Amino acid sequence: MKTPHSSWAQHFDEAYRRSFRGFYDELTQATVECVARIQPSPARVVDFGAGTGRLALPLAQAGYSVVAIDPCAEMLAVLSSKAEKERLTIPTVCCRMQDEFQSPPFDIALCVFTVLLYLLDEAALNASFQTAAGALRPGGRLLLDIPSRQIFHSYNRTAPDFVREVRVIPETEVLFRCEETIRVLDGDGWVDHADSFQIRYWEQSLVFDALGRAGFVMEDDLSAQFAGSGSNYYLASRLPRT
């Protein structure tokens, strides 16, 4: 099965900047500043759903030691290319959040920018938070967002050199089919991409219950710092294991 966004990883950054305009970079800056308040550098950060490095690169530039986790090899290849150009060292691991990986303990874990949407059942949700807990030192923090129902809608973005159509189709009360078509004017002609994958809406109570089972305690509601994102942001701490 094709990994979401794999066919258009090279155009992912441009597509999202065109889709969300200045808010895309504002959200990135707000998240980096939030991390700095939670855990000043130097510190170790694991970025789940790192994509093309929206957060991993500026955090590495700020002095953090970052490991980027993502199931899409093509997205990680873009991240690595950008890191090389910036002379940054950002190790990457191509796996899902729920998969185990070996690494020294981290001070903070990131699970933001709708990463939870790609977890389609409670087994994946529970395993993902267990992985995050296992990756953190005792007292380490998890920054996560829980997307609201309002973001599960279709939309179009059109410009003379860019066209993106996103169709969000309900399949059940909580599962949706996301179908995307992207056209980008690249060089001498248009480049066309298509993508289709499932996403899920998560009730806040289910997420909180899964966090508790994984050994996290809720520390703070940071949603006010990310107003307009369509998600609620939370900070959880990993309890020492008994």
Image (cartoon, rainbow, N blue to C red):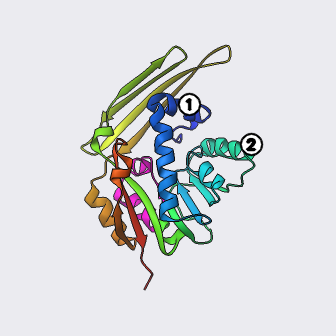
Is residue 73 left or right of 204 when viewed as pictured?
Answer: right
Q: Residues within 10 Å of mark 1 (few under 14, many from 20)?
A: few
| Residue that lies at the very extreme toward the bottom in this rendered image | 242
Residue 75 shows in this picture: yes
Q: Residue at x 40, y 51 (%)?
A: 116
Residue 85: give its label: 2
Instruction: Kindly state the secondary structure of the residue where label 1 is placed.
Output: helix
Residue 12 percent across, percent down from the top left: 55, 34
The amino acid pointed to by label 1 is Glu
Q: Residues within 10 Å of mark 2 (few under 14, many from 20)?
A: few
The quarter holding residue 95 reads: bottom right
Q: Main secondary structure of the magenta part?
A: helix
Instruction: Kindly state the secondary structure of the residue where label 2 is placed.
Output: helix
Vertical arrangement, residue 102 with respect to residue 18, above or below: below
Q: Residue at x 30, y 46 (%)?
A: 148
Q: Nearer the viewer, residue 193 or 189?
A: 189
Residue 109 percent across, percent down from the top left: 50, 62
How many marks do you count on the picture?
A: 2
The quarter holding residue 101 reads: bottom right
Q: Nearer the viewer, residue 10 or 60?
A: 60
The residue that label 1 is drawn on is: 14
Q: Residue at x 67, y 57 (%)?
A: 91
Vertical arrangement, residue 19 with respect to residue 138, above or below: above
Residue 3 percent across, percent down from the top left: 53, 42
Q: Magenta segment range? A: 110-130
